[in-house]
Image (spheres, rainbow, N blue to C red):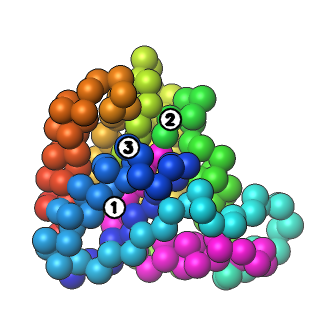
Amino acid sequence: MSRVLLLDAFPAILGDGAQILGAFRSGVARQKHDIEQYHLSYLKIHDCVACSACQSPCVLQDDGNAVLRAIGEAKVIAIAFPLSSYGFPSVLTALLDRLVSIPEAKQVAKQVIFFVVGTLEDTKPILESCALLCQREGWQELHFLAIPPSKAIGQERFLGQCETAFQYGLRIL
């Protein structure tokens, strides 16, 4: 049984991100994995202050430490976020910048799935950012699913993307 961490970086609790992660979570739950989920936009996560005193845990006292600890313990991480100026949203960037404070996270082989929702004229910049993150952290990228918003493609087509997320969840070993 794997430890699966779901990171939701969407500002809305019941929006497209919740539907995608909910579908993925349902697939993972059928496999009886341990699941932990954080809705990052509703947590207090400070930006890294580059204090060069990186420790485990980070010297900043906020909700980010619990999430960083969960990242360190997880075998599989699913990250769902809205496309924001061809990059990660600020709350996710704040968290990812602090990964240096958990060097033990690299001791557990991690598989990562990215669910990106947004107007997707060009996904190359965010694909490259995700690949660089995985390379820097020594993570294996399992899937990258780029999804237009439900308002743009209609609920029926969006639910088809949710089914894909569900199938990804079923494949977690």
Give the spatial CA distance, label 1 vs label 3.
Answer: 23 Å
Q: Is residue 60 magenta?
A: yes
Q: Is residue 168 left or right of residue 136?
A: left
Give the spatial CA distance, label 1 vs label 2.
Answer: 21 Å
The reply to whether discs 1 and 2 touch (Cβ–Cβ < 8 Å) is no
Asked if residue 137 can be seen in this view, the reply is: yes
Where is residue 111, by image quadrant? bottom left
In the rendered image, residue 66, in percent from the top left (x then y), is placed at 58, 78
Where is residue 24, by image quadrant? bottom left
Q: Is residue 134 left or right of residue 140?
A: right
Q: Nearer the viewer, residue 141 or 64?
A: 64
Mark 3 sits on what residue? 16
Q: Mark 2 belongs to which amino acid?
A: Leu
Q: Which mark lies nearer to you, 1 or 2?
A: 2
Identify whether 110 is placed above or below 88.
below
Q: Residues within 10 Å of mark 2 (few under 14, many from 20)?
A: many
Q: Mark 3 belongs to which amino acid?
A: Asp
Q: Mark 1 belongs to which amino acid?
A: Gln
Where is residue 89, by image quadrant? top right
Q: Is residue 55 magenta?
A: no
Q: Residue at x 69, y 64 (%)?
A: 45
Q: Residue at x 24, y 55 (%)?
A: 23
Mark 2 and mark 3 lie on one chain; the one further toward the N terminus is 3
Q: Nearer the viewer, residue 86 or 104?
A: 86
* Total number of numbered discs in the rendering: 3
Give the spatial CA distance, label 2 vs label 3.
Answer: 12 Å
Mark 2 sits on what residue? 83
Mark 1 sits on what residue? 111
Per the rendered image, the range of residues in magenta is 58-81
